[in-house]
Structure formats: structure tokens, C-alpha cells
Amino acid sequence: MMEHFYYKNLAYVQTKVDSDTLEKIKIESKFIFDNQSTFKKVNTELAGNLEKQYSTNKAKSILESYLTPLADEYYKISQETERCPGWEIDDLWINFQKKYEHNPLHNHSGDLSFVMWVQIPYDLEEELSLSNCKDSNTPTNSLFEFVFTDFLGRLVTHRVEVDKSYEGTIIMFPSLLNHAVHPFHTSDEYRISISGNLYMKRSKKKLISYE
């Protein structure tokens, strides 16, 4: 099942992998974590303020059957046409995010980008009830956040309240869409995610955001 999310001039699409696929990704994640010295670190290529970020080509073959249809779906709703150009999936990377680490506001290369959550080690309600943010009018502990301008030129945000139920969930969005990942505080385990970029085949046309 694919779901569409619209927020003013923002659109992203979302799906969830089956349990067998998630288990394969978790096994690959553990293998990478246990053999870090044999995998390419990609910290200098990424914006994340994370110690452990590695290239993962095997995850591409595991997830391709989900990524291409999801990209087709985004193309249909944003370009309002059934004729999809085909996609090239760039190298994927895995993030092992520990307590207090964060991913600052940034965007990606490519036409479309995605994030898949593999492991969420905290309880969202507990994160948002901590003393540093419980009385704030903008609580953001642990949240994934999009930042963009609306049709009036105002800077607005859309927060994705990622919790344990998001394990196995993939969201896909325009690569130039700014986004950030806020730090979590309540667990000593790793928050694990996989990300990557997709390029349209046979065309240099850039995707536009849905308006």
C-alpha cells in the first residue's frame, strides 16, 4: 500500500516493506556494524553530525523493488502523468545515529531521495515529554522535519513523528527539499536508517514539487 502526503506545497510518498525484507536489512545492518573497518565511511560526503555512516551497496538490491515503484508513484502525482522515465538508484548509505547526534538542515543531490527507518530505539511520547521540550510550543526531540517555503513565501515546517511503528517505513521526496533529523535523548541504542538518491533515466529534466 502506498500513501500520499500533502502539506501546502509539499508532497511525499510513503510505503512499508514486508517483514522478510526488513529482516534482511536488519541482518545487513548488523553485519556492517560488526565489520565497520571493511566498509567505506561516507561522513565527508554527507551533512550528518554522526560518527558512523557507511556505504551499503547490498541494501540497494534488497530495496530496489520498493524504491522504483515508489519513485514512479511520486512522479505520477507531481508531474500528473503516467509516463515515468525510469530510474537509476545511486549508492545507498546507512546511518547509525546515537544519543544526542543529529542531522542538520540539508538537502540531497539527485531527483528524488528516500529514507528508510530500520531501528527506532526510543519511545516517542517519552522523548517529547522530556523537560527540555515538554512545555515548548515547538517540541522536536527525535523528529524528522521538512523545512520549505509556502506559496506566500513563509518558512514552514512539517514534522514526521517517527516512532517504533516506523521500522520498515520508506518515505520519498524531492532531493532538493530541505530536511533535518533532531537528536533523541532516552536510549543508548542506535537509531538506524538507510538513505539514498534516485536519478531519472534518459532525461535531464528536474522534478518539481507538487503545488
Image (cartoon, rainbow, N blue to C red):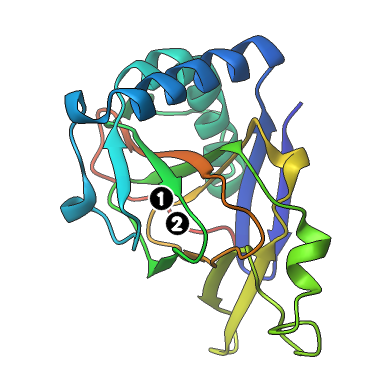
Q: Quick check: 73 left or right of 201?
A: right
Q: Quadrant of the C terminus?
A: bottom right
Residue 115 drawn above or below residue 85:
below
Return the x and y of residue 192 as percentages of the image width and height.
51, 40
Q: Which residue is mark 2?
A: 208
**Which label belongs to residue 41?**
none
Q: Nearer the viewer, residue 124 or 77?
A: 124
Q: Residues within 10 Å of mark 1 (few under 14, many from 20)?
A: some
Q: Is residue 87 visible?
A: no
Return the x and y of residue 112 as percentages of the image width and height.
42, 44
Q: Quick check: 44 left or right of 169?
A: left
Question: Tag 2, which secondary structure?
Answer: loop
Residue at 26% in and 36% down: 203
In which image quadrant can residue 23 be found? Answer: top right
In which image quadrant can residue 168 be found? Answer: top right
Q: Which residue is mark 1?
A: 207
As measured in the structure, the alpha-carbon distance from the residue carrying label 2 to the one carrying label 1 is: 4 Å
Q: Quick check: 48 left or right of 158?
A: left
Q: Quadrant of the N terminus?
A: top right
Q: Nearer the viewer, residue 182 or 151?
A: 182
Amino acid type at mark 1: Leu
Return the x and y of residue 82 as percentages of the image width and height.
57, 29
Pointers 2 and 1 in contact (C-beta within 8 Å):
yes
Number of numbered discs on residues:
2
Q: Residues within 10 Å of mark 2 (few under 14, many from 20)?
A: few
Question: Tag 1, which secondary structure?
Answer: loop
Residue 112 drawn above or below residue 143:
above
